[in-house]
Image (cartoon, rainbow, N blue to C red):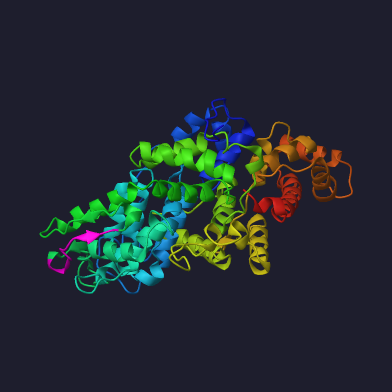
Amino acid sequence: MSLLLPVTEPLSTPQAAHLLRRATFGASSAHIRQFTGLTPGEAVQRLLADTPAAPAPLDPATGQTIMDKAFNRNLSNNLLKGWWLGLMLTEPVSLREKTTLFWQNHFVSTIAEVQDYRFMHRQNVMLRRNAFGNFRTFVMEVTKEPAMLRYLNGNQNVVGRPNENYARELLELFTIGRNNYNEDDVKAAARVLTGWADTGFRNETTATFGSLYRPNQHDTTGKTFSSFFQSTVIQGRSGDAGGDLELGELIDMILRQPETARNIVRKMYRWFINADLTAEIEKDFIEPLAQVFRQNQYEIKPVLTALFTSRHFFDTNLKGAIIKSPLELIVGSWRTFGMSVPDYTKETTNFYALANTLLTRSREQQMDVLDQPTVFGYKPYYDTGYYEIWINSNTLAMRGGYTDSFINGNIRVSNVRQIPNLLPLVAATSDPADAVKMIDELTGLVLAVDLSRSQKDFLIDQVLVPGLPRYVWSDEWNNYRNDPTNTVKQMAVQMKLTSLMQYVFRMAEFQMT
């Protein structure tokens, strides 16, 4: 029986929470309530809805965009990184940013190598524009992006002196995957790709930049591919349209191979569901999902819809089957607790101050935004061990240090503490004065893994009201509820909740999503 069969029943609260944890960077209790009761099809339709175009990165010194101006060597690459982190922090409930990050980790280019923030911004805009679109169009655009041309030396690929870097990664990483081509195919693909170049790189006198095709640098001879590609011959073309025509034929040839669709949906599976690809998963999930991809002419939206509405996705055994990435941990905590973010256009300096703080925490935990260590991307999505790679003695300490700082309000913006207000979160539970019900619902919100009754009892008796009768919590909550402006009563409750959440954040279960 195919694991891809859709769930049609309305989502329970735990199912809605699971969907939003995997599809977004974190959801508040209000968001989870909004999705509870929707069918998976209705929920995913909302997640895939169009979103407003992202605002352009701003220079905090002037408040003006930096993308319509000449290159400024004095501007930090962190402006672009902070801009994107801000989009993750503030986006509505949508698949857009999580999927854009997936594609950026698939079609890797890094700002450390490219060294022009304008090139990287343009590529990021292209990634989010195509995130739910057509994969063929996507690959065509990626190939000609100035950032990619510089990152994988496509701008050095000319007739007579082909550079094979991009051709190799196009086959191995971006489309069909290793063991499905040979070295002659790499050489032939490199010849197809000759003639493209970037323009305006780090130009400090003009805002114009992009890519161009140079017909006189293109190899116009025929290119013959191996039996992996049915010995296809791509005829050489001359003239201004030759590059696009040959590129289109090359991509079409690759997409005709069934393994291309399988390779892409495997990567989606590992990103959104689990790293463990068993024989059953290959047969009953990967293969039918790859067929959806091919039958829909490589449209991405039907694949995401099938993935996120499938019975397999909602399998309870897969809850908590992924270790949170640093961005899921950091951005997710901010979004789950409804923390405010300085207004990007009105408080630009404060916005970047917060973004830089969070970027530093993510970098410490080995996830440097826009700067993967290799063209393969972040190691936990491809290397042996997968998500476990996020956790080691150093990063675990960094994670705990971050969550301690977060819950205790030790993250500052312009020397103002950013303190999570836990009171509305608890007030939204069905019976906040009942410690058992409150703990059940609160841990269900912030943890993907269900705690045992003994674990929950420990949280009540040893953390929330350590060594005291449980009615102490009820009394203090009711005192606060009856006099909510009384700061002493507020603090009595807030301090207990802060201690509780600090402990929960240090639990192994909190590291899972």
User: Left or right of 163: which side holds 499?
Assistant: right
Residue 361 in view (yes/no)? yes
Residue 217, image quadrant: bottom left
Q: Is residue 435 magenta?
A: no
Q: Is residue 201 above or below residue 264?
A: below
Residue 78, image quadrant: bottom left
Q: In which quadrant is the N terminus drawn? A: top right
Q: Is residue 395 above or below residue 140?
A: below
Q: Is residue 218 magenta?
A: yes
Residue 377 vs residue 416, the one in the foreground: 377
Residue 58 vs residue 206, the one in the foreground: 206
**x and y percentages locating residue 9 in the rendered image:** 57, 25
Residue 435 vs residue 151, the one in the foreground: 151
Residue at 45% across / 58% down in the picture? 105
Residue 21 vs residue 247, the one in the foreground: 247
Q: Main secondary structure of the magenta part?
A: loop
Q: How many marks?
A: 0
Residue 97 in view (yes/no)? no
User: Left or right of 46: which side holds 397?
Assistant: right
The stretch in magenta equals 216-225
User: Left or right of 232: which side holds 309?
Assistant: right
**x and y percentages locating residue 417 in the rendered image:** 60, 59
**x and y percentages locating residue 38 in the rendered image:** 53, 28
Residue at 64% across / 51% down in the picture? 512
**x and y percentages locating residue 426 in the rendered image:** 68, 40
